[in-house]
Structures are given as C-alpha cells and as structure tokens.
C-alpha cells in the first residue's frame, strides 16, 4: 500500500476522547518525533506492521518510545500508579517472602525497577530482617528511569546503596536468590488477532488515507495460525467468529532466559492477568488491550504514540507452561490480596508507631487488597528451582488449578 507522505503526527482534536488532558508543548514535540519514526518504519515495512512490532517501536524506541523518553510514567505526575507507589506495605510483604531465600552470597535481581520505590523499600526492610542480599541488581532498559532510580536510592544508607548495581543485560553468571518482576510481563509487546469463520486474522497497523494510524487485518502468518489453533483446541469454547484478543509469544523466551539465569531460588512475578480459560472466555471477546495516559484509561492505541502506555492482560498459563519447559516449578499462584495477607500485611500496619500512621497505612492496604482496586485483578506467581521450604506468601490461597 502507499503511505501518505503528509503524515507527521496525529491531529489533536478539540474534544479529546474520554476527557483526556491535552499534551503539553513538550509532549507534542515528542509526539511529532515518535510519529515521524513510525511513518518511516511503516514505509520501510511496506505500509503495514504487526501489532507487536508497532509496540516495540511505540514503547522502546531509543529516545522516543514510551519507556525510553523522559516523561514521568509512575505516580501522581505520571500515567498510572503501581503497587510500590501506593504503599511501602507492598515491598515489606515481598521482603518477608524473599528473606528466607536471601543472605550471604545471594542476589536479588529486580527487572524494570520503575521509580525505584520498590528497591528502596526492599533494601530497608531486608536490612531490618537481617536478610540483605550481597548484590541488589537492577536491570533497567530506560536511561531516564535509571537516573530517576539513582536519585531516589541515593538517600539510602551507604551500606545499602553499595549493594546496588545497574545492569544493561542479564548477568553473565548465575543467580542464587530471587528474581523479581513487578508489572514487567504486561510490558512485553504482544500480537493482536481476530477469529473468523475462515480462520484467524492478525491485526496490525497501517496509515489510512488521511495519514492516521489505523487497524489493518491480514491472514495470520503460519506460526501465529498454528499457535492460535493450539489455544483454540485447549479452550472449552474455542474462539468464536468475531472474537478479538491478544497473544504474547515473547513470554516464552523471556521466561527461558530467566530460568537459565536462576541457579537456585525464586522468580517472583506480579501482574494483572488470568489463567488462559478465563482470559479467553467468550465474555472477553473484545480483548483486554488498554491504554493509560495521565491516569485515564482508554482503548485507542493510536491516539498518542510515544506518550501513553499500551498493554494487555497476562496469560499466566503461558508463563506456567514456559516455566515448566525451562525446568522451573510453579510453586505458587494466587491473587495479590491473598499474597499480601499471607505475607503479614495486617501485622505491618498494626505495628505502626501511632494511630495516625496506622490509619494512613490501613487506607493504603485497602487499595492494595480490595477487589475493585488491585487485590483481585493482580496476581502473584512464584517459579522456583531447588527450593524445598514452603513459600509463606502462597499459604492462604492456591489458584494453580485455574492455570
């Protein structure tokens, strides 16, 4: 197809969808640069991109992608709030779970440390529990986020800060201890598909006649077609014609690479998602793709390329399958609420030194625990190697039957 030469950036309409705030002048400049890069990529690829390739550019293009550019992503000044920003209680509970697996000679590797809030909380709490790892590694692909993390962790005591090391890639040597991934799996680029009577279509991205980014469907490539046929055969109701959804095949090599790194210990994941039969239930026939911009959620992945987060719910069954293929044990799977309750969150705020702080922590705990907030939507999963002791965070609930 012909790519319209006049395309530079989406025009910002006077009435923005869902009442979204208008971008600032600085954001508009980034939007123009990101859009121009997408235009060039579409031209180079014949005018059509699979959605996962679009996301790779949208989220991770150096200096332009959502996670690579300099705007705030997390907290009140960003686009969404993650559990570590809600309350230190989240990190305290993780520290309680990790402490028995850490100590002399061990390491904790955090993947994508965001604002650095979780790293700060973990190091302080692990110090109190006398379970500090020898190394606290942070694998961060964003230079901007790395600098934000450095600034935040600079307030740590020297003995704790000395354990922190930023990495550009997974360590060459194996890790004995814990690998932690909080809201990382949902940030992996994913494919989009649609089921029809004649088979599956792959949903991708093109430029329409007005030069705007738009959906475009093509017959699914052979590998994707085979994978969707496999999933359909496993699902109670298959995929009815008209069903639209997302599929992240990049989970498999991601888990394999982490499994190869883990000599002994635990890979602990937190993310929003479901087991496969729930994720692809007919009631979710419109898929789970969501965009976040300035604390507003919407479903248009083409609105502000480079300025908004685009993600989809995680297939925890795929993670479990990839773990099994890599000789990891799925040692626990439960809701975030169950994990936090089993890890002593109530005890944490009951031990607060005064009533005012106890009340503040109690309100934060409700946001982490309530079904309408993060408590049920987010799940916790533990993948282990060489671990025999029970994992206390998964003692209250076992949802592995739903994988």
Image (spheres, rainbow, N blue to C red):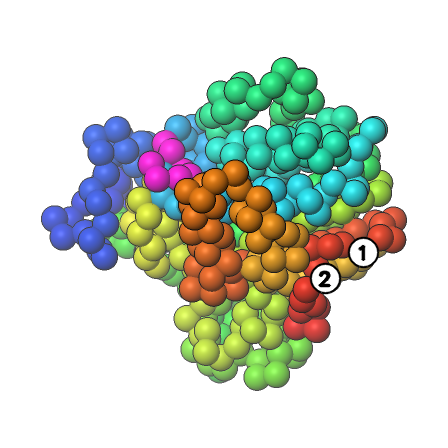
Q: Is residue 74 magenta?
A: yes
Span highlighted in magenta in the image: 71-77
Return the x and y of residue 233 as percentages of the image width and height: 65, 79
Residue that numbered label 2 is attached to? 395
Vertical comparison of 338 with 66: above or below? below
Q: Decide: marks 2, 1 in contact (CB < 8 A)? A: yes
Q: State whether residue 143 appears in this view.
A: no
The dot on residue 390 is 1
Q: Is residue 270 magenta?
A: no
What is the quadrant of residue 248 in the picture? bottom right
Judged left or right of residue 240, residue 249 is right
Return the x and y of residue 4 as percentages of the image width and height: 27, 46
Q: Quadrant of the C terminus?
A: bottom right
Secondary element at tag 2: loop
| SS majority, magenta | loop
Q: Give the residue at x 78% y 37%.
A: 102
Return the x and y of residue 165 as percentages of the image width and height: 66, 23
Return the x and y of residue 186 as percentages of the image width and height: 53, 52
Vertical comparison of 272 with 184: above or below? below
Relative to the observer, which residue lies in front, 118 or 254? 118
Q: Residue furthest left?
A: 14
Relative to the observer, which residue lies in front, 361 or 10? 361
Is the residue marked by circle 1 packed among few (<14), some (14-19), or many (20+) residues within 10 Å? Answer: few
Q: Give the residue at x 70% y 47%.
A: 97
């Amino acid at each position: 197809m012909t790519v319209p030469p006049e395309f530079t950036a989406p025009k910002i309409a006077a009435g923005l969808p869902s009442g979204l705030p208008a971008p600032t002048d600085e954001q508009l400049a980034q939007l123009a640069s990101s859009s121009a890069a997408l235009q060039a990529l579409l031209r180079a690829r014949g005018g059509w991109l699979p959605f996962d390739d679009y996301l790779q550019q949208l989220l991770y293009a150096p200096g332009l992608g959502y996670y690579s550019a300099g705007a705030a992503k997390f907290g009140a000044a960003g686009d969404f709030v993650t559990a570590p920003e809600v309350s230190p209680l989240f990190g305290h509970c993780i520290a309680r779970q990790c402490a028995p697996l850490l100590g002399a000679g061990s390491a904790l590797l955090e993947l994508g440390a965001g604002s650095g809030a979780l790293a700060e909380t973990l190091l302080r709490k692990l110090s109190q529990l006398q379970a500090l790892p020898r190394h606290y590694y942070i694998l961060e692909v964003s230079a901007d986020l790395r600098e934000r993390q450095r600034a935040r962790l600079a307030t740590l005591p020297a003995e704790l800060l000395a354990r922190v090391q930023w990495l550009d890639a997974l360590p060459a040597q194996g890790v004995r201890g814990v690998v932690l991934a909080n809201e990382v799996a949902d940030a992996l680029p994913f494919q989009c598909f649609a089921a029809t009577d004649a088979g599956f279509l792959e949903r991708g991205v093109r430029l329409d006649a007005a030069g705007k980014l738009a959906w475009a469907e093509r017959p699914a490539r052979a590998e994707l077609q085979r994978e969707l046929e496999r999933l359909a055969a496993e699902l109670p109701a298959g995929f009815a014609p008209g069903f639209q959804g997302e599929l992240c095949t990049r989970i498999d090599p991601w888990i394999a690479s982490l499994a190869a790194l883990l000599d002994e210990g635990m890979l602990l994941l937190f993310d929003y998602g479901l087991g496969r039969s729930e994720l692809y239930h007919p009631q979710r026939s419109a898929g789970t793709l969501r965009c976040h911009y300035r604390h507003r959620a919407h479903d248009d992945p083409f609105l502000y390329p480079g300025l908004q987060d685009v993600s989809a719910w995680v297939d925890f069954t795929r993670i479990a399958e990839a773990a099994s293929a890599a000789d990891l044990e799925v040692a626990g799977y439960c809701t975030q609420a169950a994990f936090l309750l089993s890890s002593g969150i109530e005890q944490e705020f009951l031990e607060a030194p005064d009533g005012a702080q106890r009340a503040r922590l109690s309100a934060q705990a409700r946001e982490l625990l309530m079904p309408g907030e993060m408590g049920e939507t987010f799940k916790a999963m533990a993948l282990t190697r060489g671990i025999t002791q029970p994992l206390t965070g998964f003692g209250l609930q076992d949802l592995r039957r739903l994988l």
